[in-house]
Amino acid sequence: MANDRKEIVRYTANQRLNHWLIALSFVLLAISGLALFHPALFWLSNLLGGGTWTRILHPFIGLVMFVSFALFALQLRRDNKITDDDKAWLKAVPKVISHQEEGVPEAGRYNGGQKLLFWSLIVLMIGLLLTGIVMWRAYFGFPVGLIRFSSLLHALFAFAIICAIIVHIYAGIWVKGSVRAMTRGTVSPGWAWKHHRKWYRKKMRDSTLK
Amino acid sequence: MASEAMDIKRRSATTTPSPSVRQSPVQGGGVAKLIDTSQCIGCKACQVACMEWNDLRDEVGHNVGVYDNPADLTENTWTLMRFAEHEKDDGDLEWLIRKDGCMHCEDPGCLKACPAPGAIVQHANGIVDFNQEHCIGCGYCVTGCPFDVPRISKTDKKAYKCNLCVDRVSVGQEPACVKTCPTGAIVFGSKDDMKQHAAERIADLQSRGYDNAGLYDPDGVGGTHVMYVLHHADKPQLYSGLPKAPTISGIVSLWKGPAKPIGVAAMVLTALVGAAHYIRNRPSEVTEADEQAAEEERNG
């Protein structure tokens, strides 16, 4: 393993804190949302203090997640522009997940899959916010037809975001050396070289310029 | 409140059987309230009786230019006389008065939409009842209702509506509105008997020139346990917007129907695919060779 001196900074402390605030609110939202979505999962509402507290808290936690995600996304948007290499990377996903790395385009700070996740999350977060506000009867009074439509869409966006986050978490587990980018903030040079070679080279160029 | 002395047919957000030990089957299609709009004089005694029996007092409101008072159903007004002025083809004015409130659908949209176990129950006799102590205040019942009946209280954020005086019915009495109606426009009994009574009323109306008189017991919600005799059954909308063919919205049915198993399956499947992938493919690890390659690239 690389020694500590050579580690590459991937996320600042504030970005890491923000990421875990998003993660915590996401988990609470998934728990409370699933509790209200399926009778078989209503018991999850106990984790938030019962059904009524679940109903009260869910929208507020949603606002927290949206705002903290928006700040996070603003910081990362420059590194998430989708290029032709990213499209080629996405086509090569079957190779990536079966350890056949030849011919897979080199990734920048984020690979095609991460960028796809990034933009999917933006769409889903905005969708969840808008439909969620329509459903928020404690403070808003929209026409019932719109509320019905929003309720269905809110559920569909929620499945999509939960599935997307399952993939995100799994990628972090499967690609060893990734989690510490979000805990300690750094990755090893070998990790950067293996998974994000273009980013590694840019980092090296930038550091030699200093 | 659910009555412990009566079997329950359906409970909201519940996947196990409801209390249903009683042997005696419900007879005559359950209970029903029949409201004959042609006999209603708009005296609002039913509203008063409802307030008295259920101990509800709405705020004193303002005149909104029509006789409706209060202007809408609320958590404290479970039944409301709605007055519609209808100009007939010959220029005559007709006053169509409808006692609005919960229709006690055989297929209740509120119950289908409710996420709180047991907050809404449907008794074996057809009464749809809200249990406020289990209500979480989300308002999904309002979203699910095809008749815009439930109201969320501004005080306690719980949902309220007519319970067909379930406490009276369970001890063999008629609902308070029925008991008080001075003209006999509201009657109560088994659904079969009420349909028969309605048929007699409709025949009478038709003999007096109301060719389109008929019974309002809409199939789209499986029929209702509150029915109307209408002089203009072909145009129920004339009666302050009574829907012509009410059903549970297709969107609500999708949301509370197939979306549930499909959504949960999608999430579980995603997690299972991940687990299977982890077991079949060793994780992607950074090797010493990768570190050396990185080092070489940095130096070279």
Image: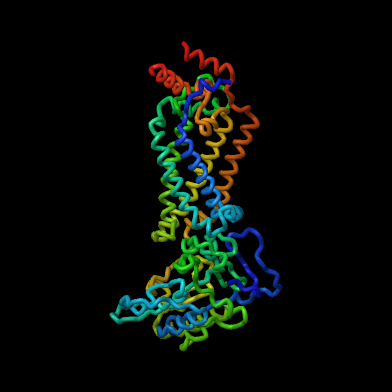
Q: Residue at x 57, y 56 (%)?
A: A49
Which residue lies at the image location 61% right of the left edge and 32% below the top edge? B277
Please identify the quarter of the rendering in which residue A147 is found: bottom left
Residue A103 drawn at (x, y percent): 50, 20
Residue B85 visible? The answer is no
Is the residue A155 above or below the residue A15 in the image? below
- Name the foreground residue: A64 vs A110: A64
Q: Can you see residue B34? A: yes
| Foreground pick, B246 / B290 | B290
For the residue pair B20 and A78, the one nearer the viewer reads as: A78
Quick one: which residue is furthest to the top in this view?
A: B300
> In the displayed structure, does residue B273 sit left or right of residue A84?
right
Residue A189 percent coordinates (x, y): 51, 21
Q: Which of the 4 quarters of the picture holds residue A176?
A: top right
Position of residue B142 measured from the top left corner of the image (x, y, whole percent): 47, 64
Left or right of B15, for residue A85: left
Instruction: State the residue at coordinates (51%, 57%).
Output: A55
Quarter of image, res B244: bottom left
